[in-house]
Image (cartoon, helix red, strand yellow):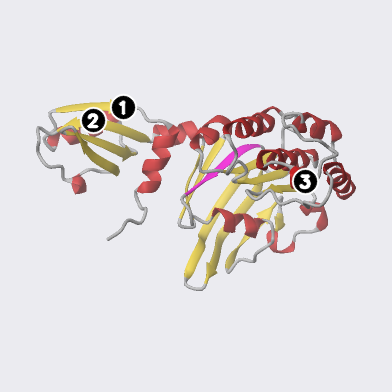
Amino acid sequence: MTKHCIETFQLTKTYGNKTAVNQLDLAIKTGGIHAFVGSNGAGKSTLFRLLLGVASPTSGSAALLGQDCRNLNTEIRGKVGYVNEEHTLPTWMLVEKVVAMQKHFYQNWDQNIYERVIGYFDVDPKQKVAGLSRGERAGFNLSMALAQSPEILILDEPTLGLDVVAKQSFLEALMFTEIEKDSTIIYCSHQMEEVERVADNLVILEKGRLVNNSAPDEFVERIRSWVVDFDAKPLDKRAIDGLLSAKLIDGQHHIVTLDQTDASFRQKLEKLGAKEVQPMGVTLNSAVNAFLSKNHNVPA
């Protein structure tokens, strides 16, 4: 197995005048859970379509398990699992018949993994798929995807629309299933509490470009929150390096910055007239939100 299971080089995909993926250079190490995060329209789903060979790039290239995604052979396709938010399944079939069909398609099917994962969900094998709840369909899909023993498993918003109990079951099943150590999970989600719980690596896309590829803790370390008292003076946002957001609350300025160390930034604020400066830590959720909001479109 290669060191990087996913690699892209100047990967670009345009639809008319819209650029969904923009000269993307990305390398994903083999193994672990890699969370993909970004605002709507950041290019995540388009990237997955390119990686799976469903769409062709406008320019650049992408490789999956060392093979060009435009020419994935049957062997490579058999090593990749995919679960999307729709959890599309043949609704007219019985659950057990769908399982039998999947077993036929995948030579590395592991029934023990299937039984362990499906145990997190109340799924009757004699029931038609049409009768399953959304959470049961999600669990059924995950169970089959993991039982395929994929080298790469792509989960695109898999918990979208699930209630709290179903989401909890899904995440527990994902984390505690006995899958091979060198398997790689690509987990796309807008829910930071999920990302914080499961992710080993955080990939952030913005307008089709890569803006972060690091451990979640390393990313959070780059973000700082500050409560600053300028003694009622107006704040010149242009003078603050790395500013992500600034709000005035009860007469105090609440500032979020990127890549500003405590000591040097405090000195900069004091030179701007700050009377009191209190640095504060941030959660992954607030760090990602501040980071993505910086360049988010707002009404004129």
Q: Residue at x 70, y 64 (%)?
A: 70
Disc 3 on helix, strand or loop?
A: helix
Q: Mark 3 — residue?
A: 129
Whether the residues at callouts 1 and 2 have beta carbons within 8 Å, the answer is yes
Is mark 3 in CB contact (under 8 Å) with mark 2? Answer: no
Q: Main secondary structure of the magenta part?
A: strand
Per the image, the residue denoted by label 1 is 280
Return the mark for residue 231.
none
Task: Report the number of numbered marks.
Answer: 3
Q: Amino acid at mark 3?
A: Val
Q: Nearer the viewer, residue 186 or 193?
A: 193
The answer to which quarter of the image holds residue 99 is: top right
Give whichever of discs 3 and 2 has the lower sequence position. Answer: 3
Within 10 Å of disc 2 (Cα), the crowding (few <14, some 14-19, many 20+) is some
Q: Quadrant of residue 173?
A: top right
* Residue identified by numbered label 2: 227
Q: Position of residue 137 (x, y in %)?
A: 71, 42
Disc 1 element: strand
Q: Position of residue 223 (x, y in %)?
A: 36, 36
**Quadrant of the snapshot with the N terminus:** top right
Find the magenta span and give its range. 32-38
Towards the viewer: 71 or 54: 54
Q: Is residue 265 left or right of residue 72?
A: left
Residue placed furthest toward the front: 131
Task: Give the number of the mark in front: 3 or 2.
Answer: 3
Report the amino acid beneath label 1. Answer: Met
Q: Is residue 292 above or below residue 110?
A: below
Residue 4 relative to residue 214: left or right: right
Task: Indicate the secondary structure of the residue bearing disc 2.
Answer: strand
- How far separated are the C-alphas under marks 1 and 2? 8 Å
Q: Alpha-carbon neighbours of circle 1 within 10 Å: few (<14), some, or many (≥20)? A: few
